Amino acid sequence: MHRIAVIPGDGIGPEVIPVAVDVLEAVAAHRPGLDFEFEWHDYGAERYLRDGTGFPDAEREAIAERCDAIFLGAVGDPRVPGNEHARELILETRFKLDLYVNLRPCRLLDPRLCPLKDKGVDDVKFTVFRENTEGLYVGVGGVFKKGTADEVAIQSSVNTAKGVERILRAAYEFARMSGAKKVCMSDKSNALRYGHDIWQRSWKRIAAEYPEIQSSHLYIDVLAMQLVRVPEEFEVIVTSNLFGDIITDLGAALQGGLGVAASANLNPDRGIGMFEPVHGSAPDIAGRGIANPTASVLAAALMLESLGHPAEAALVEKAVESALREGATTADLGGSMDTAGARAYLLTEVARLASGM
Ligand code: NAD
Ligand code: IPM
Ligand code: MN
């Protein structure tokens, strides 16, 4: 039995996460050995505005002890200035549970979805290893003379030997295990003389330990260009926190948009992971029942895989592929379905695939 803490969050989170949970239930219904217990949590903007609760440390730790995974929708609400609750729910969970691997697969599941299809791009399949606990995200810095003409704002980038090495190693180990032949490390060491020189030195040392893997380096600006020019050239990309954030929205676009991009926050040693779509709370479409649930469903597939059920994860991915192939999709992918219609198609398809296995 897998116990999952579900936090739908804000905006479209509560519209898409229940679809993914229903998909997981549908898979489990056909697999006698697979069983989930979902515990639902109301953390998010409403709760924060009501009683000031973001995501208390004690509750996060208790969930980490009690549960096998956290399944998060999206957080962010224009009514919460600075999105303080989002920081506690996403960033502090990544930091405090030490989920240092942010694994973001970028797979073009249907060639028609690629915005570069007219340029002959039909095979995008790379995985980004984004460092998830350091860099510019750590909140080290401060302001001086705030609100005056002399204001100083400092936001420091933290790069530790341990932190850089472990994400590089995770990317290379993944390449080795998955049979990928190439790893590309991306930084901005030509400008960031201290913070990214440590990436250069660690990378050279670790790359040498994997002689069977073709290692390359691109500065992040060039990587952004190459991902648009020749995305099919990439297999595994490893980079720092902020760069990984930016490059994975680009990767999402290559797959068909934020509606299909999924993400896993992992600590290979500790066990518990947090799974989420790459997209945010999408306030511009929230409440209309038109959000694409695919990213959350694919995040659920990542969760299945991480919990030790690769065949079931593949089944969910197959159901998504059928939906894309048949055009059984929401409007962001060119379909005419709403969230409920997309859900119904996926549930039928999961049941069909599962009973045929
Ligand atoms: P966003 O990802 O929420 O939306 C960007 C665009 O993509 C919007 O036009 C939106 O309608 C569209 N979109 C996103 N997901 C979609 C889906 N499933 N189906 C159809 N269309 C979809 O990014 P944003 O607008 O910059 O951010 C909104 C809020 O979400 C902000 O508060 C931001 O901080 C937060 N955010 C949260 C997360 C997270 O919880 N993991 C991630 C990114 C942004
Ligand atoms: C993501 C999001 C978050 C990030 C935000 C909401 C803090 O954009 O998960 O990609 O920057 O990591
Ligand atoms: Mn992002």
Image: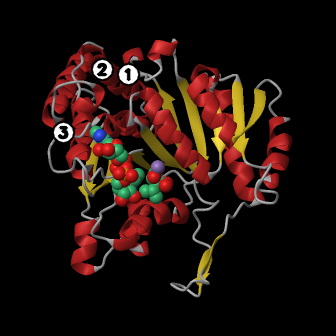
* Label 1, residues with CA under 10 Å away: few <14, some 14-19, many ≥20: some
Q: Is residue 256 left or right of residue 160?
A: left
Q: Is residue 209 left or right of residue 5?
A: right
Identify the disc placed on residue 113.
1
Confirm or reject: label 3 Cβ below 8 Å from ligand 1. yes
**Looking at the image, which is closer to me, 116 or 33?**
116
* Label 2, residues with CA under 10 Å away: few <14, some 14-19, many ≥20: many
Pointer 3 residue: 290
Q: Type of residue at label 3?
A: Ile
Cα gap from disc 1 to disc 2, whole angstroms: 9 Å
Q: Earlier in the sequence, mark 2 or mark 3?
A: 3
**Residue depicted at x 50% and y 49%:** 265
The quadrant the C terminus occupies is top left
SS at mark 3 in the image: loop
Q: Which mark is nearer the camera, 2 or 3?
A: 3
Q: Residue 293: x and y, percent? A: 27, 37
Q: Residue 245: x and y, percent? A: 53, 48
Q: Is residue 55 visible?
A: no
**Looking at the image, which is closer to me, 236 or 317?**
236
**Residue depicted at x 30% and y 79%:** 52
**Residue depicted at x 43% and y 73%:** 57
The quadrant the N terminus occupies is top left
Q: Is residue 135 above or below residue 123?
A: below
Identify the disc placed on residue 195.
none
Pointer 2 residue: 324
**Residue depicted at x 70% and y 33%:** 184
Q: Earlier in the sequence, mark 3 or mark 1?
A: 1
